Structures are given as structure tokens and as C-alpha cells.
Amino acid sequence: MALPTYADPLERAWYYTYLAICTLIFFFLIVPIIVVIPLSFNAEPYFTFTQKMLTLDPTGYSTRWYDLLLTFGMNAPEVSRDSSWWADAWNNANWINAAKNSIIIGFFSTILATVLGTIAALGLSKPEMPGRRLIMAILISPMIVPIIITATGLFFFYSSIGISHWTIFGWKIPYLGVVLAHATLGIPFVIITVTATLVGFDHSLTRAAANLGANPRTTFFKIIMPLILPGVISGGLFAFVTSFDEVVVVLFVGGLDEQTIPRQMWNGIREQISPAILSVATILVIISVLLLATIELLRRRGERLRGITPH
Amino acid sequence: MADLTTNVAIDNHLTTADGKPLKAALAAAQARNKRRAFFLVLPLLAFILITFIVPIGQMLMRSIDSPGFILQTDVITKEETPLMVNLGLWFKDNPQGTEPDEAAYTALVSDLIALKKTRAQGQAGTRINYELAGSRSLFTSGARKAAKLKPPYKEAMIKLNKKWENPKLWQVMRSASSRYTGSFYLAAVDRTRDANGDIVRVEENRRVYVNLFVRTLRLSLLITFLTFILAYPVAHLLATLPMRKSNMLMILVLLPFWTSLLVRTTSWMILLQSQGVLNDAMVGLGLLDDANRIQLMYNEFGTVIAMTHILLPFMILPLYSVMRPINPSYVRAARSLGATSWTAFRRIYFPQTVPGIGAGALLVFILSVGYYITPALVGGADGTLISNLIAFHMLSSLNWSLAAALASLLLGGILILYWLYDRLVGIDNLKLG
């Protein structure tokens, strides 16, 4: 909103005050996220800027907390860093194991949520869909229901059906309960993003494909899928982030060996908060920056595909 | 009317290539489309029902179904053994308010002996303990000594422990003898039944839940209001800047939205703690004495400021999507007709943004009343919300029925707001970034 030329001095003054207020609010939004980054390089075990850090003295900074992330839980962190040291870190370091678990759980719950959610969104976007409003409300509800209620409900449900003892051909399915729960939590995001993509979808394209002799399967993979793919991927990313960041359900239904990054962070914050938490936080902030960039690129691509150009 | 009949007549004459009336063919095609759409949604609907709706429904059933006093369920075989059978019969024969006589105590003693045999005295005592503190030990010691008692049992029991003649105890045992009970809902609103079965408020120092519900509502309203105050100018700026610039600034809104909730809570913890960044900065600037650093965290202030930050994007995004399409010429027209900039804002611009305010406020409010993680970490004792108490009863006090009653009250409130949101805003209009 540019200031019009006819603005009087009072309006001018107000306009600059308004800009200053907005700047402060942007600071409020972003500073609490940025502040962990320099603090994670603190050489001292404190959560505040030391004198040395403020004077930009290099000795005030170190990567010791990142190092701790690697070595914590290792059998022999002290030996020289050859291939066996790295193997030890890969197999035994707590944070690395937590990251592996988080990625496995996130991957499978995202696949489940995205596949089921995309198919359902295709049905929901058809004008003939009966009871659309109610079904949509039910499918979005995992986002609205307080997480503690979901977690306690699943805790009793899983223990009553004994899900942790389920096996397929004698193979115990790991993470099953957590994956199902995280898929449920991710589904609303997939539904929202994919139905939003389908709003601008031109249904005459599918009719044209059918007219030219394509069967429904070909129509889906050749016509529909490429057009809604940006929405599907961003829905999937939302679902992945939801799972990757989820702690309460894991605490309630996860087994003792199912440590994830958020669970490890939660324990770290509750017990003795160490600056190692801040280095994890920094890594997570960097991941979210990358995800945000991906989403933004997808959104622009989707708009270009559908012929909407930014003005 | 005449037109309509001719139309129908024409319709009946029109047929498809294979000779079916056009109307019937159209109806069949529509029914097929309907089925097709529904079958696409069906797998997900079934998935959500099984992994989400059923578990929550089952959990909420615990708020009225609490058979610990009358049923023992084997953990492995799921076999159910009835408990307190004789006492149950006595309660059935004698109406509420009957003074427990010798027959009642005889039934009690025989049931206690049976409890000892099935090792269910702890479970039965715990069920009574939920409503009358101190009853668990009464049952465990009673079951231990019951076999040695001699008639008359009434005197013997009272001699064993004076608590056995407490009329309140008998009232609780009576209510626990029926499988379904509303007493956990009474407890969740700080009410209880007295010895006569009338509903009364619990003692002053035990009234926690209503206060906590009130605090949850108060803090959620405050957070909603603060997010609105902070979001409105920012959304307005984003909506009125040229697209290229506003997309740049939008990143500052979306980055917090995409950042892990735990990371944001941790950041607030290091900012707010008494040895943290904010206090240090104030001491460094000489605004604050080192000796009296301000307690910014582990109280209501910590919860409110951290949750305001975390929920702010949920207010900015709906406001932005309503403000963006507002035509600036309306305000310009108002100005040219002589309105001051304040009047033009108040009478022309603001009313057009009300749908966005409603959408954002409802969403933020719904999310904040059920918040758990942030209050648990930065809330301390007086900054916690109702979710934290539900978690406490689930994990620590193990009073699952009370937790379920509190949860169903919370869920009921949220579903009403959710329904309202759907009516006013429409779930389809929910946007993420």
C-alpha cells in the first residue's frame, strides 16, 4: 500500500508507524526461530549469548554440540575417527537412531496418507459425491481433535487389540501403531491440499481423454496425475512434516525402542536441557527452510500448469 | 403446467441408442457416478473410522463405564469375574437411603473374602477411591482381615475401621455397583453426591476442574485476541503490497508455520528463562537488576506468549486470503466522498475483512483450547491447560474414567466450534499456505 500523494502529515506519520509496527511483528515471528542458530554454536553450556559470542570472538563458538549429537550413545566415542568410528556412530548414536526411526515412520505414514488421501480427494471433488460435507468434516477432524484425546484413545485401542504383537508370517511389524496413527494425522493435510488443486481442475480434459479412447487408468496416470501432482506432493510433504514433528502419540503408543527425534527432544527438554537440543533445532530449522522452498516451487509450477500467472 | 407436461411427454419419447428412455439412462448414469465417487472415498473413510473415530469413542466410553468394583477382567484371557455380588443384591433389595443393617455387613464381609481370593481388593478399592479418597487402603486391609471376623459383622467391621460406617462410603459403593455411572462427569465439574445421593459441590480446596476449564477458555480467548491484533496489520500489509514483495514477506510467515513445534517451544524457553536471552539483554541494558530477574516462563505469561507466536500464522493466512481480493477502489471512493482515512477503514475496509477474522479466530481458538505440548513445557503450574490435566490423569493418577470425562467435555466443546466453523467458513475453505 503506497502512500497516496494527497496524504496529510498525520496520515504520513501513521503510515510510517504502521510500517514500524509490521516490522516489529515480523521480528516477533522470525526471531524466536533464528535465535537458536547462533546459540547452537555456543562454546559454553549456556543458553544465552556469552561475552565472547557478542564480540564475535572465534573462541566463543564451537561445533561441540553437533559433535555430541554424533557421539552421544556411541560405544567408543574417543577413538580416532576412521571407518569403524563412523560405523559405531551409525549403529549406536542415539540421535542417529532417532533420526532413522523418524524417517522410517515418516516415510511409511506419508505414503499411506498420500495414497488414501489423494484417492479420496478425487472422489470428494466430484459434484455427484453424496454426503460430501459430513464426510469432509470427518476426514478433516484429526486436525481439529486435541492431540491428547487422539493419543489416549489410540493407547487404549492399540492395547485392547494387542497391535504390538501382530505378525505377518512370524515377522513382527515394527512401528505399525505409530505409522497408522501418523497417517491418520497427516490425512487432513493431504485432503486439503489435493482438493484445493482439484478446484481449478478442468474436467473436460478427462472427457476429452475418454473421447480419444483412453481407459480410466490411462486417463488417471496420463492426464489427472500430472496436473494434480504438485498438490499431491505438497500434501505429502505436509503429512511428512506432521509425522516428523509429532511427539504425543509416539509417547503414548510408541514402544521403548521407537525413539524418534521429537521424542528424544521432548525428553531432553523435560529433563536436563542441553545445548545439543539447540543443534538439533538448528538442523530442523534448516530442513524446514528447504521444505518451504520446495513447496513454494511446487506452488508456482502448479499455478503455471493451470495457467494462473502471478500479477 | 401445460409446458411441463409437454416436456415430460417429449422426454418419454427421447431414447438412447439402445432404446432406453433418456431420463432413466441419465438417472442410471448419475447413480453410477455417485457410487463411483463414494467408492473412491470409502477406503479412507473406513481407515479414519477404524484408526480414529472408534478409538476415541471407546476411550470416551470409559467416562461412564467404570466396572472396577463389580467386574474383574483377566489381562490375558479377557475372562470376566463378577465381584461384590452379595452387596450388589443387597443394594438391589434396599432402596437409596436405607441404613446398612447386619445383612448388608454380612454381604460385605463375604464379598471381601471373595475379593481376597481373586486378588481384586486393590482394583475394587481403587474404584471407590476415585470418589472417596482414602478408600483403597480400607479395602485392602479389610479384605486381609475379613476371614477372621466373627458375627455380628456390623460391629466387627466398625471396630476394624470406623470408616466402614461412613454413609458417604455406602453411597459410593451403591453407585459403583451399577456398571454405568455419571459420577465422573460430576467430578469433572467439581460436583459430587452426598450421603443422600444429592448433587453438591465438592469442598473448596478440591475445586480444580471448573477453574481449569475457565482458565483454558480465558487464555484461549486472550491468545485468539492477541493473534488477531498482531495478524491484522501484517495481513493487511501482505495483501496490499505488490505480489512479488508480498511473496517475499510471506516466507517470514510460512517459515514459523513449517518449523517444528518443539523447536519453536524450545526457542521460547531459551528466550524466556531467567538466565535466558531476554533477561540477559535487559540486565545488559541496565533495565533490570541482576538480582531480580523477571520470571517470564513457567507461568501464564510463558504459555500465552509462546502459543501466540505458534498460532499466529493460523490467523494471518485466512485474513490474508480474505484481504487480498478486496478492491482498493472502494476505500478510494470513500475517501473521495469525504471520509477520513479512519472512517474509510472503519466503515468500508474493516467490514469486508470480517469473514477472515471469523475464520482465523475460530481456527486459533479451536486449536488453542486443546493445546498440550507448549503449556506442558513452558506453562509450569499455573500456565497449564485442560489437556495437561487429562494427560496427568492418564499417565500419573491413572484415573482413566475421570480423564475420559474431562476429554469428552473438551471434545464436545470443540466439536460445537468445529460445526460452527463449517457452517460459517466451510471446511473446504481451509487453506494451508
Image (tube, grey):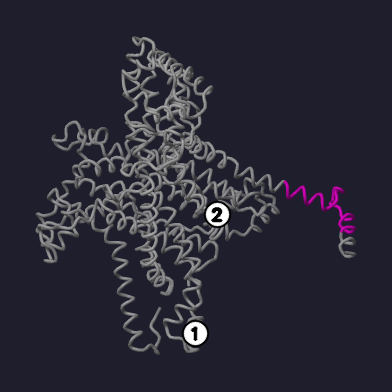
**Residue at position x 46%, y 38% in the image:** B198
In depth, the one of B231 and A296 nearer the eye is B231
What SS does tag 2 mark?
helix
In depth, the one of A135 and B409 nearer the eye is B409
Above or below, comparing residue A13 to residue B158 in the picture: below
Region of the chain picked out in magenta, as a range = B8-31
Mark toward the viewer: 1 or 2: 1
Three-letter residue code for mark 2: Thr
Q: Pointer 1 indicates a residue of which chain? A: B
Q: Residue B272: x percent and y percent?
A: 22, 56
Q: Is residue A258 left or right of residue B424?
A: left
Q: Residue A52: x percent and y percent?
A: 9, 58
The answer to whether residue B282 is visible is yes
Above or below, comparing residue B311 to residue B134 in the picture: below
Above or below, comparing residue B129 to residue B144 in the picture: below
Residue B27 lies in magenta, yes or no?
yes
Residue A29 lies in magenta, yes or no?
no
Q: Residues within 10 Å of mark 1 (few under 14, many from 20)?
A: some
**Residue at position x 57%, y 46% in the image:** A119
**Residue at position x 40%, y 51% in the image:** B369
Residue B334 numbered mark, or none = 1
In depth, the one of B160 and B259 nearer the eye is B160
Three-letter residue code for mark 1: Ala
Where residue A109 sits, quadrant-wise, is: top left
Distance from Cα at disc 1 to Cα at disc 2: 38 Å
Per the image, the residue denoted by label 2 is: A195
Q: Could you tell me which quadrant the N terminus of chain A lies in? A: bottom left
Q: Residue A288: x percent and y percent?
A: 34, 53
Q: Pointer 2 indicates a residue of which chain? A: A
Q: How many marks?
A: 2
**Residue at position x 36%, y 23% in the image:** B164
Dominant secondary structure of the magenta stretch?
helix
